[in-house]
Image (spheres, rainbow, N blue to C red):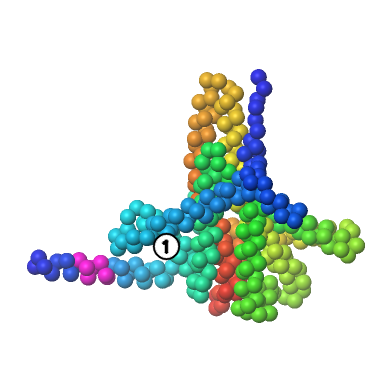
Amino acid sequence: MSDDQPSDALARLAERLDKARAQDREKPVGNGDNAGQQLALGIGFRIGIEFVVAIVVAVGLGWAFDRVLGTKPFAMIAMFFLGVATGMLNVYRAITGQGAAVGFRRPRGK
Amino acid sequence: MALELHPLEQFKIEPLIPLHIGGLDVSYTNSALFMTVAVVLITALLVLGTKRGALVPGRWQSVAEMSYEFVADMVDTNAGHGAEPYFPFVFTLFMFVLFANFLGLIPYSFTVTSHIIVTFALAATVFIGVTIIGFVKHGAHFLRLFVPEGVPMVLLLLLVPIELLSYFIRPFTLSIRLFANMLAGHTMLAIFGGFAASVGLLAIFPVALDVAILALEVLVAALQAYVFAILTCLYLRDALHLH
């Protein structure tokens, strides 16, 4: 009795390990949005950056296009609106938990 | 009473060993010094920690193994299968940002990641690398990333530029997020520290606040390193699996 106890315990441990590993495999692929979920400040910061950076980069690109193509100020204006749209889309993606993924698509068959 | 506040002085880059090569200023600065310290500490932790290779790890080996497993797990769950070859890169990136953030919290030290050029260099490396990987793995097919599925032709004219733009702002959001968090936190600490120096006995209040902010900063330092690494993993997943 006393010498089959350790092997018994080991068997139970193996069982638990197998179960835990199986659970681990079933775990869905994360999308990075659990990062910083505890910190409301962090979320606010992230959303703000997402929105502002999109507009700033778009306007910067528009300004560069204008300089190269000599279409001042139309590319900048067009890119501003594009930037706002991108910012909105990214904020929407960030808060609905689709990650920062570009070209997000739903898994097939859904 | 004049308030002596210089909250931004801590971010000043000073050359320690002036060095000029062909008109380029490549001086060894305090920023470079702390990068070196971070790299030396990481190497020391991992090499010395795992040197004994005990079956039951001691404290240092435990820390080394835990950080390894933490990142390995992160890469596995977020970048998906086939991302294992990129684990060393993500691990290096995570450890470097983590150590740079933590080192910056030590009083009188310098926060490498509070400079946007540093974080942007890291983010641009990730961005360019991921784009190259995407094209190598999928060729021109990689461009499908920018074409959402099941969308009418007319809308595509609008959506493709939006997707393109949101792809190209990645290095900017990635770098600005880390840099802004570090800059804001350290500036806040310095401002309250400056208050404390100028209000005499009442200093206990700003100092108490500083202690609380410092605790928050420890969390932010770890969290931002984590976010940086996990977003790298997500971008890698895009390039590897195209959804």
Residue type, label 1 = Glu
Q: Which residue is mark 1?
A: B69
Residues B27 and A15: in front is B27
Image position, residue B179 (x, y; %): 62, 50
Report the magenta residues as a range. Answer: A9-15
- SS assignment at label 1: helix
Where residue B135 sits, quadrant-wise, is: bottom right
As for residue B6 lying within the magenta part, the answer is: no
Image position, residue B178 (x, y; %): 60, 52
- The structure residue drawn at horizontal position 66% and vertical position 80%, both measured from the top left corner, is B139
Where residue A17 sits, quadrant-wise, is: bottom left
Q: Is residue B6 above or below residue B148?
A: above
The dominant secondary structure in magenta is helix
Q: Is residue B154 left or right of residue B64?
A: right
- The structure residue drawn at horizontal position 34% and vertical position 62%, both measured from the top left corner, is B53
Where's the C terminus of chain B, which quadrant?
bottom right
- The structure residue drawn at horizontal position 65% and vertical position 37%, both measured from the top left corner, is B9
* Residue B162 visible to an observer of this rendering: yes
Image position, residue B158 (x, y; %): 76, 68
- The structure residue drawn at horizontal position 47% and vertical position 57%, both measured from the top left corner, is B43
Residues B157 and B171: in front is B171
Q: Dot 1 surroundings within 10 Å: few (below 14), some, or many (20 or more)?
A: few
Label 1 resides on the chain identified as B
* Residue A49 visible to an observer of this rendering: no
Where's the N terminus of chain B, which quadrant?
top right
Residues A95 and A103: in front is A103
